[in-house]
Amino acid sequence: MNESFAAKFPPGPPPNLIRALFGAMQQNPLDYFSAMAQKYGDVSGMRIGNFRSLFVNHPDLIEDVLVNNARKFHKGRILQANKYLFGEGLLTSEGDFWLRQRRLSQPAFHRTRINAYAATMAEYTEQLVSTWQDGEERDIHEEMMQLALRIVGKTLFDADVTQDAKEVGETLDLLLRMAANFGRTVLVPLWVPTPRNLRAKLGVHRLEKVIYRIISARRASGRDTGDLLSILLQVRDEDGTRMSDRQLRDETITLFLAGHETTANTLSWSWWLLAQNPAVEKKFHEELDGVLGGRIPTVEDLPKLNYLNHVLTESLRLYPTAWGMARLAAEEHEIAGYPVHPGYGVAFAQWVVHRDPRWYDAPLEFRPERWENGLAKRLPRFAYFPFGGGPRQCIGNTFALMEASVVLATIGQKFRFRLVPGHKVTPLASITLRPKDGIQVKLETRK
């Protein structure tokens, strides 16, 4: 590689460590990256200290990294910095170890097995709405978090985590708010005894107590309930040894957190969008009434709920729970003529791509109808990628979509939500995209 080529770096904001730690990128990364794309185009460059990263916005370039050259890239620095939480689970591990763990976990997410979870999802949702009263105010995000936590505990680990829901929810909220501080997450290692790091360690310890309790109870019972934990407990390495409690902890905590956080966020944003769009909400309710007629939805009903599917798809377009992704180059590569050396970062933001007017008419409007005439097939592959893509695509995407569909259909038949005036809903861009201060709604029983 000649010297002039090696010196090339995409245009972008001037390097400034203080601005990176405390400026616009830290305060509001959604607006920051949207402005970057608008100002610099499909490829721009960021320099923070001695770290260089390319920010990429074109679907073809994203596909080139995530699919065509996936082996050249590892997970980004934010996730690596959060290994104190996720350990060597599917979200953070690399190479042969990741491939092995992915193969071992895959059977738990087979469509047949996931379909069997639908009844549990509907049952737990029915239990939740039986506690609701017409006219009362609730934080629908908190409600969806606790519901999704109970569902993931039962379906993936055959455990009742009702008693833990509040504590786990509060702990997760704390950890994700900390992770939203990208600069400190990367630049201040966990071993530095700052108040933030001490709180993070305490939070992880609280989560581990729940996980280890579930693992211990299952080892003691010896039961095979056919869930993910049963599969992982039975697996043996090549030398015949079973997974250690630490390995099980890393895999289960990843799925435990990701499995309920992503679904709860998707549901929360869907309810919020429906509440603001009465015509969409009306059509949504009419379909539920016509297909289900008041009965609990089954997995066989879901393909018939076309408009509900479009509502979910559009909600994930505007408010993707994975709002951005990053990779770290492990080998030499090139993106749009710019060299990518080992150690360079490459970032993409679903938030930005999903709102690009090149791919979507009126991109900021909530229009489920846009998906009715085969739009998904006409789009570039990575113009819509709420669950990522390539070999590292989210293993639980089918599970999450089915759960969201069942919950929307079950609740939507009985209630509609009215937003509480004066309560500001603000997206918090952490590892996931969640409503910063929840979503306050007034419950209204459907007659």
Image (spheres, rainbow, N blue to C red):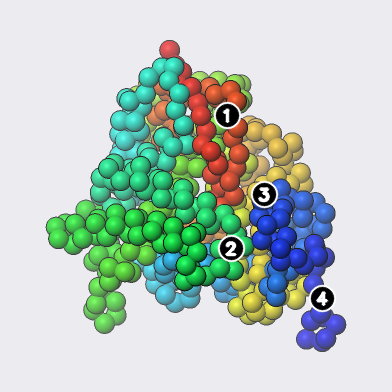
Label 1: how many residues lie within 10 Å, few (<14), some (14-19) or many (20+)? Answer: few
Q: CA distance from mark 2 to mark 4?
A: 29 Å
In the picture provided, is 345 more to the left or to the right than 122? right
Please tell me whether mark 3 sits on a helix, a strand or a loop. Answer: loop
Disc on res. 8: 4
Q: In the image, is residue 360 above or below residue 249?
A: above
75 vs 18, nearest the viewer: 18
Q: Disc 2 marks which residue?
A: 184
Which callout, 2 or 4, points at the residue further toward the start of the chain? 4
Q: Disc 1 marks which residue?
A: 423
Which mark lies nearer to you, 1 or 4?
1
Please tell me whether mark 4 sits on a helix, a strand or a loop. Answer: loop
Which callout, 3 or 1, points at the residue further toward the start of the chain? 3
At label 1, which amino acid type do we have?
His
Label 3: how many residues lie within 10 Å, few (<14), some (14-19) or many (20+)? Answer: some
Picture coordinates of residue 76, whole percent (x, y): 58, 67
Which callout, 4 or 3, points at the residue further toward the start of the chain? 4
Label 4: how many residues lie within 10 Å, few (<14), some (14-19) or many (20+)? Answer: few
Q: CA distance from mark 2 to mark 1?
A: 29 Å
Q: CA distance from mark 3 to mark 1?
A: 19 Å
Residue farthest to the top, as pictured: 447
Q: Disc 3 marks which residue?
A: 28
Label 2: how many residues lie within 10 Å, few (<14), some (14-19) or many (20+)? Answer: some
91 vs 372, nearest the viewer: 91
Please tell me whether mark 1 sits on a helix, a strand or a loop. Answer: loop
At label 4, which amino acid type do we have?
Lys
